[in-house]
């Protein structure tokens, strides 16, 4: 992941040339588990850049319909279409950030802290006993200085997709490392997209769960040891 060009905007404009050469995750496959049977992952790209003050993430999501019912910060927007990022800056599976953004630019953030050594099952999910005793969620925590933007794309009146830009501020993000600026380093991370298409026969909307680093369906928030490795490097 390479440095951002100067004066990178957080606009979610798909044609922004600053993102043209950004390192790109070309697709997000379906999450693991029988829930994925019969489903197809939707086209999704994740682009990544950084500078000393921010870690920048862009999601480009193809979709012919958009379900975004939540309007207030920290609403359960994961129950509607959204993109998500999990970040463990120290990489020890002891504390990680969860951030979500909806197509309406509604955000959800929390920090999760494990007060014991991590122990996971074969699917890299924290064990139930550990979660019940030693896993703490702080929904009151906020990423001070977070910047996000979202735009919808249409062809005539028909939806074709949506774009989200995220700028993670260095100081609150890197607090566990005692740093207030990004520099070349390696972080643990995962990137996800949730999509809820219309149900058939008036039933419940199904969930299409997609992720970068393989994780069990519905369990990214309790799978810190399943995160991938995100490397911030200098100029090419």
Image: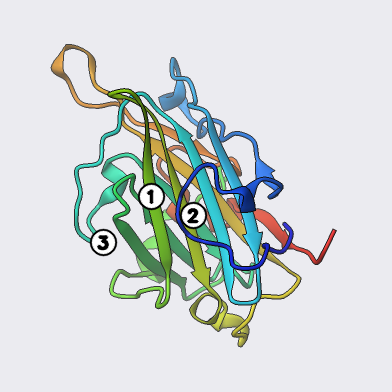
Residue 55 can be seen, yes or no: yes
Which residue: 25% across, 62% down?
Answer: 73
Q: Secondary structure at mark 1?
A: strand
Tell me the crowding category of disc 1: few under 14, some 14 to 19, or many 20 or more residues within 10 angstroms, Cα based: many
Tell me the crowding category of disc 2: few under 14, some 14 to 19, or many 20 or more residues within 10 angstroms, Cα based.
Answer: many
Q: Residue furthest left?
A: 202
| Closer to the eye: label 1 or 2 | 1
Residue at 49% across, 25% down: 41
Give me the C-alpha separation between circle 3 and circle 2: 15 Å
The residue indicated by pointer 3 is 74
Distance between the alpha carbons at the discs numbered 3 and 1: 16 Å
Residue 58 location in percent, x, y? Answer: 53, 50
Residue highlighted by disc 2: 85
Residue 150 is marked as 1
Is any part of residue 222 visible from this angle? no
> Circle 2 — which element?
strand
């Amino acid at each position: 992941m390479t440095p951002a060009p100067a004066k990178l905007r957080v606009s979610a404009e798909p044609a922004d040339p600053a993102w043209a050469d950004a390192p790109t995750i070309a697709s997000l496959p379906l999450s693991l588990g029988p829930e994925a049977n019969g489903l197809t992952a939707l086209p999704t790209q994740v682009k990544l850049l950084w500078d000393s003050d921010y870690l920048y993430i862009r999601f480009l999501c193809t979709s012919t319909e958009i379900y975004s019912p939540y309007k207030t910060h920290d609403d359960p927007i994961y129950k509607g279409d959204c993109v998500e990022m999990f970040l463990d800056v120290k990489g020890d599976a002891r504390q990680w950030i969860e951030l979500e953004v909806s197509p309406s630019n509604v955000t959800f953030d929390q920090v999760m802290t494990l007060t014991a050594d991590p122990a996971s099952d074969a699917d890299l999910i924290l064990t139930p006993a550990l979660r019940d005793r030693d896993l703490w969620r702080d929904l009151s925590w906020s990423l001070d200085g977070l910047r996000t933007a979202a735009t919808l794309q249409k062809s005539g009146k028909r939806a074709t997709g949506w774009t989200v830009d995220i700028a993670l501020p260095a100081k609150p993000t890197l607090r566990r490392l005692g740093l207030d600026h990004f520099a070349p380093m390696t972080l643990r991370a995962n990137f996800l997209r949730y999509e809820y298409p219309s149900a058939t026969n008036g039933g419940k909307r199904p969930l299409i769960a997609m992720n970068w680093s393989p994780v069990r369906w519905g369990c990214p928030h309790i799978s810190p040891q399943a995160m991938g490795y995100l490397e911030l490097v200098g100029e090419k």
